[in-house]
Each structure stands twice: as structure tokens, then as C-alpha cells.
Image: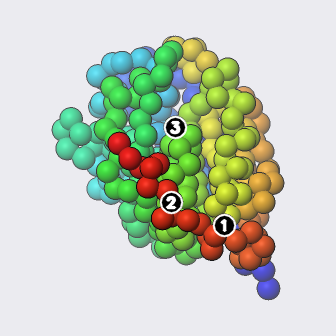
């Protein structure tokens, strides 16, 4: 009998002004995400992933210290604790992107992973931090990740995380595959005109090269007050052959649900022996300073 995992990708349109108090913004976005998680559960999803820093707008298009107030501890902060309760209530693995405070002044773009019984399993911190004009001033907000490329043993299988700009770097995709990942989620905030032509190219290529599933999540719509670009949504799952299974809408909130046949990973790996035929003894130059 095939091993099928039903996975949900959650994209949420930010509809505020961006000028409201931080706590009001967070409260509204978290309430919407909770409703979307419940929607995913009603569709039988066993795992769900939210978008990058899901509880607010993509504030990195300005450099303002007030957004530091949106950081939280992981796992002791209120959002992780809430998601642990939801995961247990729905019997669903949750992948939760949060703006993390490690200590005052040490902030990370982080994703927490919670198992279907509500157990906190760990976190991934975004490795590659962009500073790209216009509008991606992430080095103002985030330290580079320092936890490596963990793979989490969950109720549905082995789950890895890569965050947004990370996807442009093939080395991390391979590290996750070598650590046993069966599905890698890439929560993102990416706009038309800059990288849209890569959106349905890079991640299917990573799925093929590393022979696992990829869940790609992007924000939808234009966010106030900056309106510096259109987050073009189109969250999708991709199988180990590079096939897109389902694609979300461009400009509105959605819960994108796909059934993933995990047995396909073994089938494809037995055909394309990329892991057998690797030559790490020849790769030292790619990690040279």
C-alpha cells in the first residue's frame, strides 16, 4: 500500500496598513493562520507549513527598529506554544516561520517544527541573509543561521526546512538530502520582477537533483504601506521528478493541499543514482574561502 502524506501549504495575504501596533498586526495574522490551519485539518492534511515570518507583513523592505518588537523566543514564546496546542488538537505536524529572539540583539529568521502530538522538535535558522536593493534589507534584522541543516523526524516522515533566499544556494538542498530529508519546505517572501522567473525553476530542480519532495510557499499580493512589489503567491508542491502537483493563486490567501506518494522517492532514487555516484572527494573547491 503506498505511503501517502497529505501536505498543506498556507499563503496569507497581508491586508493591514503596516502602521498598526505590532501586537495588533500579529494578533490579526495569527488568527487568520489559525483558521487556515483548521481548514487544512478539515481537508485531512497531516502536515502544514506557513509562509516566511507568517504573523506580519514582509517588513524587510524598510529598516526600522520597531520590528524588533515582533521577535519571540522559541519554543517558549506565545506563538510556538499556540502552535504546539494546535498541532496536538489536529494531530498535524506544523512548520512555523517566526522572527526569533535568541537574546537581545541576536535575532534570526527561524522556522520551528512541531510534531503531530504537540512536541517541539527543533528549529532551522535561515543561513543565507540577503541585502538586495530595492527592498530586501534583511541584514538589518537577521543574523546568519548557525544551526546547520537539521532534518526532523516527524509523524509523517523526515522533514527539512530551507528559507526563501536560501533556495538560491544548492549546497543546503544537498545537505538536507544527505541528512535524509523526504520533504523540504521553503517558506518565502519573493516579488515579481526580481525572482519570479526562478520560482518554478530552482525548486523543481532541487527536488530532482536531491530526489525528494519540495513544498514552496510564497506570500500573495501587494503589502502596504510600502507597495514595493507584488508577492506573487503560487505556492506549490513538487515531486522528486520535478512535477508541480498543485499551484496556489497569485494574489489571494489559500490553503494548497497535495497528496505526496513518499514511495516515489525510493523509486526515483533507484533509477537515478545521484547519491551513489556523488564524488565528494572532488568537491573541496566549492567550500574554499
- Alpha-carbon span between mark 3 and mark 1: 25 Å
Q: Which of the two discs, 2 and 1, labels the residue nearer the N terminus?
A: 1
Mark 3 secondary-structure assignment = helix
Q: In which quarter of the image is the C terminus?
A: top left
Q: In this view, does 78 lie to the left or right of 219?
A: left
Disc 1 marks which residue? Answer: 274
Name the quadrant containing residue 100.
top left
| Residue tagged 3 | 165
Q: Could you tell me which residue is drawn at 74 percent across and 77 percent down? A: 270
Q: Where is residue 149 in the image (x, y as percent from the top left)?
A: 43, 58
Question: So how many labels did they put on this image?
Answer: 3
Question: Is residue 287 in view from this perspective?
Answer: yes
The answer to whether residue 115 is left or right of residue 42 is left
- Residue 20 against residue 144 in the figure, above or below: above
* Circles 3, 1 touching at the beta carbon (< 8 Å): no
- The nearer-to-camera label among 3 and 2 is 2
Amino acid at each position: 500500500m503506498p505511503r501517502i502524506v497529505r501536505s498543506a501549504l498556507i499563503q496569507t495575504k497581508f491586508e493591514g496598513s503596516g502602521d498598526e501596533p505590532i501586537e495588533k498586526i500579529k494578533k490579526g495574522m495569527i488568527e487568520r493562520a489559525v483558521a487556515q490551519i483548521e481548514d487544512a485539518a478539515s481537508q485531512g492534511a497531516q502536515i502544514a507549513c506557513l509562509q516566511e515570518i507568517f504573523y506580519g507583513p514582509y517588513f524587510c523592505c524598510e529598516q526600522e527598529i520597531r520590528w524588533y518588537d515582533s521577535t519571540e523566543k522559541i519554543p517558549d514564546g506565545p506563538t510556538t506554544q499556540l502552535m504546539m496546542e494546535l498541532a496536538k488538537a489536529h494531530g498535524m505536524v506544523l512548520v512555523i516561520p517566526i522572527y526569533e529572539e535568541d537574546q537581545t540583539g541576536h535575532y534570526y529568521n527561524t522556522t520551528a517544527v512541531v510534531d503531530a502530538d504537540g512536541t517541539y522538535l527543533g528549529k532551522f535558522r535561515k543561513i543565507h541573509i540577503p541585502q538586495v536593493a530595492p527592498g530586501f534589507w534583511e541584514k538589518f534584522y537577521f543574523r546568519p543561521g548557525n544551526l546547520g541543516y537539521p532534518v526532523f523526524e516527524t509523524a509523517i516522515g523526515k522533514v527539512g526546512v530551507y528559507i526563501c533566499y536560501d533556495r538560491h544556494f544548492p549546497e543546503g538542498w544537498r545537505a538536507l538530502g544527505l541528512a535524509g530529508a523526504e520533504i523540504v519546505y521553503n517558506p518565502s517572501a519573493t516579488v515579481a520582477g526580481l525572482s519570479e522567473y526562478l520560482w518554478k525553476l530552482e525548486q523543481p530542480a532541487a527536488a530532482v537533483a536531491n530526489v525528494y519532495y519540495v513544498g514552496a510557499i510564497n506570500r500573495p499580493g501587494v503589502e502596504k504601506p510600502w507597495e514595493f512589489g507584488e508577492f506573487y503567491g503560487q505556492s506549490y508542491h513538487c515531486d522528486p521528478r520535478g512535477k508541480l502537483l498543485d499551484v496556489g493563486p497569485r494574489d489571494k490567501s489559500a490553503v494548497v493541499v497535495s497528496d505526496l506518494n513518499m514511495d516515489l522517492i525510493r523509486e526515483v532514487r533507484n533509477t537515478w543514482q545521484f547519491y551513489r555516484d556523488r564524488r565528494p572527494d572532488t568537491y573541496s573547491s566549492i567550500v574554499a574561502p
